[in-house]
Image (cartoon, rainbow, N blue to C red):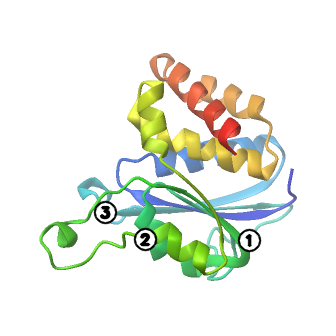
């Protein structure tokens, strides 16, 4: 397990961005890290951008990640990874779903959607893990479990034991949602 880290979760309202970062924060606290988390909802209820920043280490003084300092960007919607790319450190990594949620201005033809997001990032030499987490979550029985698939990938990248996440899912999730989220985390570890 790493000794410290800066992780930026980004997505659109309703994708479980905050749930994933809360679960990661709980796991890191269980491991004895000092953890700080901030969240920005924006117009989340209307499909707007949502971001959370999780910082952990021996001693953390601020929940905010400076530009160019994020070890990971975990993106639940592919264009959101581009929007926040300035926060990624040079040797950082992007973990992104290929899922698209087109904003209002794109739908009415006033803006263009960045179709080649992941291609652009890899051409810049960035380390990117891209997958259709939404599609995989649907296969598992619940599209909303895409966030746990991405969290599973991140957790394995960080060296976080899967058993700890499983324990916390059983502790914090309603019984009806536990099984699909456990399978989603498992799928994430397998895909990492």
Is 111 on the left-hand or right-hand side of 20?
left
First along the sequence among labels 1 and 2: 1
Residue marked by disc 3: 48
First along the sequence among labels 3 and 1: 3
Q: Position of residue 147 (x, y in %)?
A: 51, 44
CA–CA distance between discs 3 and 1? 29 Å
Please tell me whether mark 2 sits on a helix, a strand or a loop. Answer: loop
- Check the image and report above or below for 109 versus 34: below
First along the sequence among labels 2 and 3: 3
Q: Residue at x 81, y 52 (%)?
A: 33
Please tell me whether mark 1 sits on a helix, a strand or a loop. Answer: loop
Nearer mark to the viewer, of 2 and 3 = 2
Residue marked by disc 2: 116
Q: Camera-side residue: 144 or 164?
A: 144
Q: Residue at x 58, y 46 (%)?
A: 150
- As drawn, the residue found furthest toward the top would be 175
Q: Residue at x 72, y 41 (%)?
A: 27
Is 51 on the left-hand or right-hand side of 70?
left
Q: Residues within 10 Å of mark 1 (few under 14, many from 20)?
A: few
């Amino acid at each position: 397990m790493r000794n410290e880290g800066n992780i930026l979760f980004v997505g659109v309202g309703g994708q479980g961005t905050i749930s994933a970062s809360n679960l990661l924060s709980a796991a890191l606290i269980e491991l004895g890290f000092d953890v700080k988390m901030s969240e920005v909802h924006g117009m989340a209820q209307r499909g707007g951008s949502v971001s959370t920043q999780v910082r952990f280490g021996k001693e953390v003084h601020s929940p905010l990640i400076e530009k160019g300092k994020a070890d990971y960007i975990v993106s639940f919607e592919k264009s959101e990874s581009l929007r926040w790319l300035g926060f990624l450190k040079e040797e950082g990594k992007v973990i992104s779903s290929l899922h698209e949620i087109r904003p209002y201005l794109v739908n009415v033809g006033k803006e263009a959607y960045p179709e080649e997001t992941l291609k652009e990032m890899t051409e810049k030499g960035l380390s990117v893990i891209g997958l259709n987490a939404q599609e995989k979550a649907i296969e598992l029985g619940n599209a909303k479990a895409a966030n746990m698939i991405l969290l599973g990938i991140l957790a394995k990248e960080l060296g976080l034991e899967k058993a700890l996440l499983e324990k916390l899912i059983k502790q914090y999730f309603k019984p009806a949602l536990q099984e699909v989220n456990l399978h989603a985390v498992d799928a994430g570890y397998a895909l990492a």
